[in-house]
Image: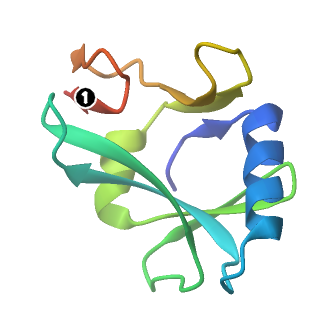
Amino acid sequence: MVNLQLTEAAADKAKNLLASSTEPHTALRVAVRNGGCSGMRYELIFDGDRGETDDELDFHGLTVWVDAESATFLDGITIDFSNELNDAGFKINNPGAAETCGCGESFAL
């Protein structure tokens, strides 16, 4: 089982976005994909199809799915949400990242 944390602020924002979606999504998928300026990038998307090997987590009433391949890169991360005027959005703190880009959307281990 993947060890990640989602703050209440992040869960509340995701639940609000999910509730306003016109698509039949049921969960927030947290994944890692190749790309970004540091080598790997985070992906937060709404999804309606749970994979057979996905971990399913619950944070403050929000269902989160993580695929097995991404889980190894997400161990120990915390996802938060900021409403600050100049820095609004989801923020990912990855203590295992050796390098991150300036925008915080990609990393290297």
- Residue 100 on image: x %, y %: 26, 19
- Residue 1 on image: x %, y %: 52, 56
- Residue 52 lies, with reference to residue 80, above or below; the image says below
Amino acid under label 1?
A: Phe
- Asked whether 106 or 88 is in front, the reply is 88
- Residue 85 lies, with reference to residue 107, above or below; the image says above
- Residue 96 lies, with reference to residue 9, above or below; the image says above
- Asked whether 49 or 82 is in front, the reply is 82
Q: Colour mode?
A: rainbow
Q: Which residue is mark 1?
A: 107
- Asked whether 69 or 27 is in front, the reply is 27
Point 68% across, 30% down: residue = 81
Point 56% across, 40% down: residue = 4
Residue 42, quarter of picture? top left
As helix, strand or loop, the secondary structure at mark 1 comes to strand
Question: Is residue 72 toward the left or the right of residue 56 in the image?
Answer: left
- Residue 16 lies, with reference to residue 8, above or below; the image says below
Point 19% across, 38% down: residue = 36
